[in-house]
Amino acid sequence: MAKKSKDARVQVILECTEHKNSGMPGTSRYITTKNKKNTPDRLELKKFNPILKKITLHKEIK
């Protein structure tokens, strides 16, 4: 029998923390997927922010 591995994967939105604090208009957001069983806490990744033109910390929002 095949396992139901699709239930563990969910889509999450990552939003830039530095951009939110800077007060500049616009937002930098990325959409990705994560496994709820392996990473139950919120995801934090370093991604490129095109408005600030540098790599910044992006945190999962809900």
Image (cartoon, rainbow, N blue to C red):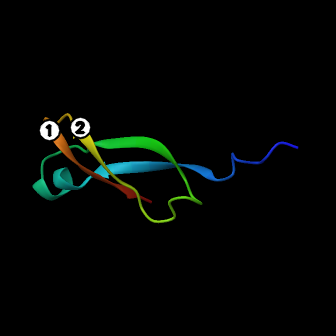
Q: Three-letter amino acid code at disc 2?
A: Phe
Real-space Cα separation, disc 1 to disc 2, in angstroms = 6 Å
The residue at 69%/45% (across/down) is 6
Residue that appears at 42% across and 62% down? 42
Q: Are the two marked residues, 1 and 2, in contact with CB atoms closer than 8 angstroms?
A: yes
Q: Which mark identifies residue 54?
A: 1
Which mark, residue 48?
Answer: 2
SS under mark 2: strand
Of 50 and 48, the residue lying toward us: 48
Percent from the top left, x then y, of residue 15?
31, 50
**Label 2 Cα crowd, 10 Å radius (few <14 / some 14-19 / many 20+):** some
Residue lying furthest right in this view?
1
Q: Is residue 30 above or below residue 41?
A: above
Q: Residue at x 23, y 56 (%)?
A: 17
Locate the C terminus by quadrant. Answer: bottom left
Q: Quadrant of residue 29?
A: top left
Of callouts 1 and 2, the N-terminal one: 2
